[in-house]
Image (spheres, coloured by chain):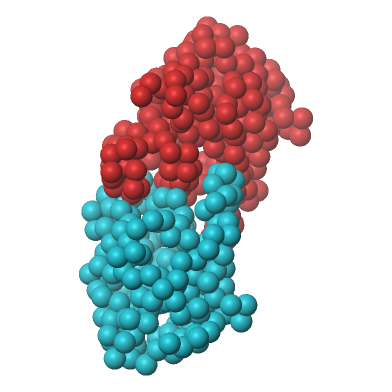
Chain colours: A cyan, B red
Amino acid sequence: MSAAHRRAVVLLSGGLDSATVLAMVQRDGFEAYCLSFRYGQRHAIELDAAEDVARALGAARHVVQPIDLRAFGGSSLTADIDVPKGRDEAAMASGIPVTYVPARNTVFLALALAWAEVLATGDIFIGVNARDYSGYPDCRPEYIRAFETMANLATRGAVEGTLPVRIHTPLIAMTKADIIRTGTALGVDYALTQSCYDPDPAGRACGACDSCTLRRKGFAEAGVPDPTFYQQRS
Amino acid sequence: MSAAHRRAVVLLSGGLDSATVLAMVQRDGFEAYCLSFRYGQRHAIELDAAEDVARALGAARHVVQPIDLRAFGGSSLTADIDVPKGRDEAAMASGIPVTYVPARNTVFLALALAWAEVLATGDIFIGVNARDYSGYPDCRPEYIRAFETMANLATRGAVEGTLPVRIHTPLIAMTKADIIRTGTALGVDYALTQSCYDPDPAGRACGACDSCTLRRKGFAEAGVPDPTFYQQRS
């Protein structure tokens, strides 16, 4: 069956990476079913961005799934922690980021698998990247392969061979600059995306948190004008 | 480290099997953190049963995590479908049961893994049984092993070797009668548990759905008096 008649579940955060994945999925002719999560993140404005991105790129549907992490008693996970600013990449690689979700990609991929089963598809896309952000175990290719192996033993369609599960990671070996160039060629409007961990009430990026720093560097290296509205331009 | 100082996450449905697992976990000296799910199930009374069981057996905590399956558009999954009654085991093995949750054990185990990470433990218990209920791909030992392999690549504690993940399935090879005998010896009050797919408003079991049929047969084979309140005793 060609991709033109296939559905795909796409994990969509509202950031730059997953917007690019969605554009690649659309280019390849899939019908895209986009999944985001509301887990008490302080930058919940990224969910508005996800909705804008899904609409702009013509996704078939966009669902925001709530996860009640507060029930697990890890209140510090989503509480008011100061967002670190102005760190270099070595500093970023240490410590737990403010957007930390325990067993994050496992929870996200498990719910993507549930939706995929309802949609009768096995194609799931996730914008993990093992190059620019290598500190997370669950962004590594060996983790993704192990999830795929498990998923192919988990659902009836996969076990019977009618709906084999494939976890697609089109960005896994790309630099941020590669990602931006690819998305720009596919018409992604990055002004709609939201990477900042600490936007102001108007949604403008701080320009200095880890995520803003990586984003700015990516646009500079790609030689693409950065359309982000920053609170301060440095 | 001995189990006496370890925490464990226990998936608790309110039914007979997971109540027995909890009693075994307590026997082995773990501090038990019980996790149930509210996913629009028609027999939501099982969540009251889970709470009663957790309290009676002295669990450290009981959390009910909501999952919004309706968001995935599979409204038939939890809608008003007639509960089949009076079927034999061959008939039970065919078709999708009313309690069907897509990618069920993957979603449940993923959220258990998230909680385990917050609790700084790698021990997760699930009452799957490959013997009396063999129709589900995600109850098989090879599925459980694949989930465990994936989980050990997913979290920082597992990758660093400080918190290896172990998915414990103490019931996997037991018959329903074995399970009932074990739980009875450990003091489980099965009158608190709720197996019926179609209880009446007072919470009394129908006595004839697939789940009631397996439960009654289990008590009969175990030679243990069945404490269940049935609407009709046959």
Image quadrant where one finds the C terminus of chain A = bottom left
Q: Residue at x 68, y 33 (%)?
A: B48
Depth check, front residue: A118 or A231: A231
Residue A209: quadrant of the picture: bottom left
Q: Residue at x 28, y 45 (%)?
A: B159
Q: Looking at the picture, how far across and down is residue A92, in whole percent?
A: 35, 65
Q: In the rendered view, would you say A58 is above or below B94?
A: below
Task: Please identify the residue farthest to the right as the structure is shown.
Answer: B202
Q: In the rendered view, would you say A87 is above or below A66?
A: below
How many numbered markers are drawn?
0
Q: In the rendered view, would you say B207 is above or below B116?
A: above
Q: Looking at the picture, how far across and down is residue B156, in whole percent?
A: 34, 48
Question: In this rendering, would A219 be left or right of A44?
Answer: left
Depth check, front residue: A157 or A54: A54
Q: Residue at x 45, y 46 (%)?
A: B114
Residue A201: quadrant of the picture: bottom right
Q: Looking at the picture, how far across and down is residue A139, in whole percent?
A: 31, 59
Q: Residue at x 59, y 32 (%)?
A: B61
Q: In the rendered view, would you say A231 is above or below A50?
A: below
Image quadrant where one finds the N terminus of chain A = bottom left
Task: Please identify the residue farthest to the top as the structure is shown.
Answer: B223
Res. A157 visible in picture: yes
Q: Looking at the picture, how far across and down is residue B91, in whole percent?
A: 47, 33
Question: In this rendering, would A89 be left or right of B121?
Answer: left
Res. A165 visible in picture: no
Depth check, front residue: A102 or B193: A102
Residue B85: quadrant of the picture: top right
